[in-house]
Amino acid sequence: MCNIVIVNIEAHMNHKLASHIRAQSRNNFLINLVLNGLIAWFLLKDKPALSAGGEHGYGPDLVITGFLLAALVAVFTMKIHRGQLAKGQHEAVPEQALGAIARVASRSDWLNSLLFGVAGAMLAGATVGVLVLLPVPPFEPLAYALFKGVWAGILAALVVPPAIRIGLRATS
């Protein structure tokens, strides 16, 4: 009987955490879609079409955005959730429930955010590489702003789940 109660409590906690992670990912997707799309539009609306490289290239912009966005979203998410854990607003995530994250993540939020930033920059570089290999014509400013907004939203949504789990990691 006791085991059934424990399993039900764990299932409820897992469902509650999964629901919270989905909501935070969705919110971060929408926020970054709008903010990054608008920033790109206002900065580029009077510029010529953008190719991957050169003076008006989007490659460096995406790589820098990938690094900064992933690092900042990660560190804020980890710090916020660590504070919420301390206040008892969330249950701690056991080390063994982190899986592969536990092997890569350190106990330093700043070092972890650096790792997220490097991963974001690498994802941006891969995105630029794919766009270069495809027969994609240069982006008009509006098209690039829309693309960048969606891309940034997806990146933020990908960063949030592991960052939340790291922020809620149990201190053994």
Image: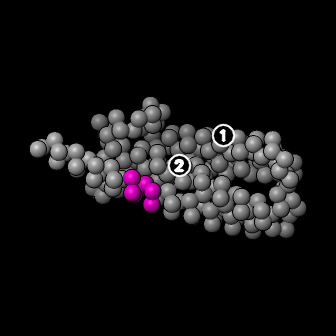
Residue 21 magenta = yes
In the figure, is residue 89 to the left or right of 155? left
Between 135 and 124, the one lying in front of the other is 135
- Predominant secondary structure, magenta span: helix
Report which residue position mark 1 lands on.
122
Q: Amino acid at mark 2?
A: Val
Cα–Cα gap, marks 1 and 2: 13 Å
Q: Is residue 41 above or below residue 78?
A: below
Q: Give how far across and how far down residue 15 sits, in percent.
A: 33, 53
Using a 10 Å C-alpha cutoff, classify the residue at mark 1 as few (fewer than 14 neighbours), some (14 to 19) or many (20 or more).
some
Q: Give how far across and how far down residue 2 sits, in percent.
A: 12, 43
Residue drawn where x is 45% and y is 56% of the image: 22
Pointer 1 or 2: first along the chain: 1
Using a 10 Å C-alpha cutoff, classify the residue at mark 2 as few (fewer than 14 neighbours), some (14 to 19) or many (20 or more).
many
Residue drawn where x is 53% and y is 44% of the image: 113
Residue drawn where x is 22% and y is 50% of the image: 9
Q: Give how far across and how far down residue 65 sits, in percent.
A: 67, 51
Can I make out residue 59 in this image? yes
- Residue 145, which numbered label? none
Residue 102 is drawn in which quadrant?
top left
Q: Amino acid at mark 1?
A: Met
Tag 2, which secondary structure?
helix
Residue drawn where x is 27% and y is 53% of the image: 12
Q: Which residues are magenta?
A: 18-23
Tag 1, which secondary structure?
helix
Between 14 and 169, the one lying in front of the other is 14
Quadrant placement of the N terminus: top left
Residue 123 is drawn in which quadrant?
top right
Report which residue position mark 2 lands on.
159
